[in-house]
Amino acid sequence: MSKFQLKKFFKAAYELILVFLQFFIIILHFFQWEFLPQKQIIQASPFSYFLGILIIIIGFIIMLVSIKDLGKNLSPFPRPINNSNLVTSGIYRFTRHPMYYSLIFISTGVLIIKLSIYYLFLTISLVLIIKFKIALEEKYLINKFKNYLLYKNEVKV
């Protein structure tokens, strides 16, 4: 295997690992493991439950709108699809990565409802993985779309 092939292999492996970890952490939100301590950070209240549900609903709305706006360009991988277009309309006029932010919203909502160290760990882990995924995705977008840097400068979040 040449040096170029090896570099390409590791880049593809890194992308797959990020996508796998993202989905794995999302799935972990739906399970409560008996062997892990579910110690609450603070006592949950009806207000925290309501706030958590509200944040989850907002996250799902943002996710649905971004799925609609992305259309055929939707992919779980940071590398854009071959025949994709740069989407800068709809919700993408206001934020560059609404799909990722919606996942963080939903995770944060679950954290606020549960108020446990387990969900705090999941939310922080998801934020870190999404941060790495956004950094990689933006490199691909800069290389693929000539006007991405202009879009990136205009749409900050």
Image: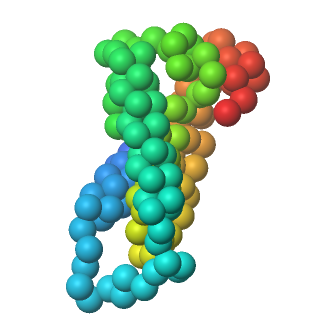
| Residue 151 in the image, given as x and y percentages of width and height | 68, 17
Q: Colour scheme in the image? A: rainbow
In front of the other: 15 or 128: 128
Q: Is residue 125 at least partly visible in the picture? A: no
In the rendered view, does 113 fall on the left or right side of 151? left
Q: Quadrant of residue 33?
A: bottom left
Question: Residue at position x 59%, y 28% from top?
Answer: 96
| Residue 107 in the image, given as x and y percentages of width and height | 44, 55
28 relative to 20, above or below: below
Question: Residue at position x 61%, y 16% from top?
Answer: 93
In front of the other: 12 or 152: 152
In front of the other: 96 or 120: 120
69 relative to 15, above or below: above
In the rendered view, does 52 fall on the left or right side of 89? left
Question: Residue at position x 41%, y 68% from top?
Answer: 114
Q: Quadrant of the C terminus?
A: top right
In the rendered image, the residue lying farthest to the right is: 153
In front of the other: 124 or 34: 34
Q: Is residue 62 at least partly visible in the picture? A: yes
| Residue 84 in the image, given as x and y percentages of width and height | 40, 15
21 relative to 81, above or below: below
Question: Residue at position x 46%, y 37% from top?
Answer: 58
